[in-house]
Image (cartoon, rainbow, N blue to C red):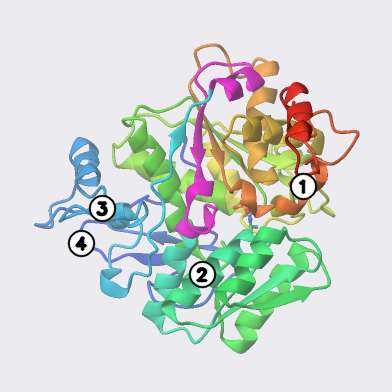
Amino acid sequence: MTPTTNRSVFLDHGEASHQRCAACGTTVPELDPAPDCTSCGGLREIVHGPPVDAFGVPLRGAALRASFAEHCCARPLGSPSGVWRFGSLVMPSAGNAIVSHPEGNTPLLHRSAIDRFVGMEGLRIKHEGHNPTGSFKDRGMTVGVTQAVRIGASAVACASTGNTSAALASYAAQAGIPGLVFVPAGKIALGKMAQTLGYGARTLLVRGDFDVCLRLVQEASRELGIYLLNSINPWRIEGQKTIVFELLQQLGWDVPDFLVLPAGNLGNTAAFGKALREAHALGLIARVPRLVSVQAAGAAPFARSFGEQFATRYRVEAETIATAIRIGDPASWDRAVRAIQETNGLVLACSDEEIIAAKCAIDAAGVGCEPASAASVAGVRTLVADGTIRAGDRVVAVLTGHILKDPGMLVDLHQRSDFAHANPPIEIEADIGAVDRIMRLGRAH
Ligand code: F0G
């Protein structure tokens, strides 16, 4: 781990958590509702005191690992949430304000068919699509909406490519707080739209892309006092850190060599970087994996900048079939740069064709994911092919969303005559002879 600032990762023992601007260092109390730094406009991060045991004694290393194991599942002491199990590193003062489904506790899978596709053995798949609303966003949203309850927010809002809006709508409904979402008109997947409407958030179809939606919701939050729950909100990042804590725990705290994830607005890249920094500082792990963020080639300003040692911050007009990561001006840029630099990480861009090929391999293995999620597996395949990932390396790829998030894209794809893996439905007469003829055709693909 190579620190890029000399600010401490944790506060002194006994100090209460607070918010700190990552750019200018200004601190504000935990319950300050502003979405970003009112001194310089930079993004805030949460800093905590070291985690402590029931007697207030700081916990590190093996003792802290044991305390997480104790809190696993719903036994008398434990939490049924894979986020709140790590509450001492997320929001130690949450008390009984917590709004939880519960969420997290997602599986770490291994499938030989996916190994064959990427060309390596033992790839582990952390499937965040198994969260209650079908994406990793639930981990940030349980914390964000809990904070909304703590500050007495009158309404919560976000801009979204669809998953954040589904998660916000669900958790806001549970908390009884009105939700408002801004999504790019005509550009969000059907499953996400259906969820957002069903859970009851007021849904605005904005004539513009995600980046336009984000600017508008920031303005709405400033002018109208609505609590902003995009991933620029530092509490969202605290929740998303638990993807990393949980997968490390599932690996027995045996650190992988590479940790690969899809990237759009870069909130998750930032969250992974913060989780690894903290896990390292607390002695939970002795070294960190190389973090690999994978963008879609049509929405890859961060990958381009990485190629130039991050000398320039780029903004692009984004276009990709992976609508979740169709983002041209990522908000968490600086904190994601820090995550990549501190972990000797990498940023890649994969074409839509590569992403679809990976998605088809994941789907056909019976695992399934939404298109953006498959960027991680496409990225692993690229790194195996160019020799960066070598035989024996231990790799975890994160799938961020469920296959049912984007049913429209899938049904269209499988009915396309130019798609090699097409598996079109076949209409038949209600007649056993017709079934017999189809059976003789063999497997779909
Ligand atoms: N994968 C999925 C399925 C997503 O929905 C997103 C982001 C990402 C990856 C990228 O994560 O933005 O933190 O780099 N979705 C946001 C949304 C933008 O509005 O649902 P990121």
Q: Quadrant of the N terminus?
A: top left
Classify mark 4: helix, strand or loop: loop
Name the residue at 18% across, 52% down: 75
Name the residue at 82% across, 52% down: 316
For residue 411, the mark is: 1
Residue on which the image places disc 2:
170
**Quarter of the figure with residue 261:** top right
Q: Position of residue 24 (x, y in %)?
A: 52, 63
Inspect the image, locate mark 4, and give the three-letter code of the amino acid beneath it.
Gly
The residues tagged by marks 3 and 4 sit, at their Cα atoms, a distance apart of 8 Å
Name the residue at 48% across, 21% down: 394
- Asked if disc 2 is less than 8 Å from ligand 1, the answer is no
The disc, 2 or 4, on the residue closer to the chain's N-terminal end is 4
Classify mark 1: helix, strand or loop: helix
Number of other residues with Cα within 10 Å of mark 3, as a class: few under 14, some 14 to 19, many 20 or more: many
Furthest residue in direction right, as rendered: 418
287 shown above or below 238? above
Residue on which the image places disc 4:
14
Residue on which the image places disc 3:
50
Q: Quadrant of the C terminus?
A: top right
Q: Position of residue 237 (x, y in %)?
A: 48, 57
The residues tagged by marks 2 and 1 sit, at their Cα atoms, a distance apart of 26 Å
Whether tag 3 and tag 4 are in contact, CB under 8 A, the answer is no
> Magenta stretch?
112-139
